[in-house]
Amino acid sequence: MLGMEAGESLARRQDAGEPPAEEVLVSVLVPVRNEAAGIREAVAAMQAQRFPGRLEFLFVDGRSEDATREILEELAHDDDRIRLLDNPGWEVTPALNIGLRAARGRYIARMDAHALYPPDYVAVGVRRLEDGDVDWVSGPQIPQGTETWSRRLELALRSPLGIGGSPFRRALTEEIETDGAFTGMWRRETLERHGGWDEDWIVNEDGELAARMRDAGGRIVCLPQMASRYFPRRSLGALARQYWRYGQYRAKTCGRHPESMRRSHILPPAVASVVAISVLPLPSGARAARKALGAYAVALILECARSAPRAARRRDAAFLPVVLATMHLAWGGGFIVGSVRFGLPWRAFGSALRP
């Protein structure tokens, strides 16, 4: 975690002769690595923010091997709000803490290079934080596919079987309180009081931070006006790797913060376990597992039929069972491996199953 270093950062910056924090109202933290394909579009959406105060955009580069850094240097030359920082550790969590230490704003926003944010995102977030009754404000994460496989993944991420119990992964019409968030905004002192992001979590870092804040009595809200467009992965393999990592670190988060586990978190490891049992040389257990898998397959096919009318192309909907099964098995298998790696979160299961 950021630790005491964050609390001393303002004094260090002032001693070094840097501008005082009051000159920048909002610092936007953007971890990047190998984002050349879409970084110009993402930066343009950030630059289009309609906000009366001064912004700064801190792009923390994890030693990109493509043209990401060169593009950002070019953009920074034309916009003095853009600052480029180095992240030798590559992972997102250290990048966020590097950005937080360097930030000069009174408010901190996190933005993702794989998403486009509405022009009033920062303005709406600051106004809501100024009300003083919440610790973290964010918006819905709305998937938008742009290529063949990302469109198929978009369908899955709009499905109840794809988003589980995450209320911030669907469109909203009014503000809701949530137990997690996609990126978002905070008062600077809130993040520093909690020590920033825990660098033991290289994945699910926002989930761990959310659980920590809620354990301390903090509130997280999701506002429909802050909805962002999120670009899913572009291949089934990339999706599987993403969800494999998510599952492992969700198990770790549940072990540290048992109350953060939802009932929907139990389904993927249950599916992965049933698949494993179905191939074991245990006649009675394998038969029961195959019946359960048959019921699961029927649920996927029914969801495919329900989603087909909403698909841009019927062919995309035909792949929905494959995409959903990949998500469930990768996440569920990752959760099982994470439970071995970090310890089985017994208390979390008890909390999730409690009436």
Image (cartoon, rainbow, N blue to C red):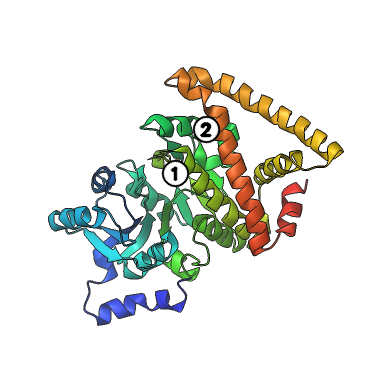
Which of these two is toward me, 244 or 156? 244
Is residue 53 visible to us here?
Answer: no
Q: In this figure, which residue is indicated by the disc labeled 1?
A: 139
For residue 64, above or below residue 9: above
65 with respect to 330 (left or right)? left
- The count of marks equals 2
Provide residue 243's location: percent of width, then percent of height. Answer: 54, 47
Residue, x 71% and y 59% (percent of image)?
344
Q: Which image quarter: residue 32?
A: bottom left
Residue, x 38% and y 55% (percent of image)?
110
Secondary structure type for disc 1:
loop
Q: Which image quarter: residue 294?
A: top right
Which callout, 2 or 1, points at the residue further toward the start of the chain?
A: 1
Is residue 70 visible to us here?
Answer: yes
Provide residue 298's location: percent of width, then percent of height. Answer: 68, 24
For residue 147, above or below residue 20: above
Name the disc covering residue 156, or none. Answer: 2
Residue farthest toward the left in the current orientation of the protein: 78
Q: What amino acid does circle 1 point to?
A: Gly
For residue 260, above or below residue 201: above
Crowding at mark 2 (Cα within 10 Å: few <14, some 14-19, many 20+): many
Residue farthest toward the front in the current orientation of the protein: 281
For residue 250, above or below residue 315: below
Residue, x 45% and y 78% (percent of image)?
4
Image quadrant occupied by the C terminus = top right
Residue, x 41% and y 77% (percent of image)?
5
Crowding at mark 1 (Cα within 10 Å: few <14, some 14-19, many 20+): many
Provide residue 148's location: percent of width, then percent of height. Answer: 39, 29
Gap in Å between the C-alphas at discs 2 and 1? 20 Å
Secondary structure type for disc 2:
helix
Q: What amino acid does circle 2 point to?
A: Ala
Q: Which image quarter: residue 56?
A: bottom left
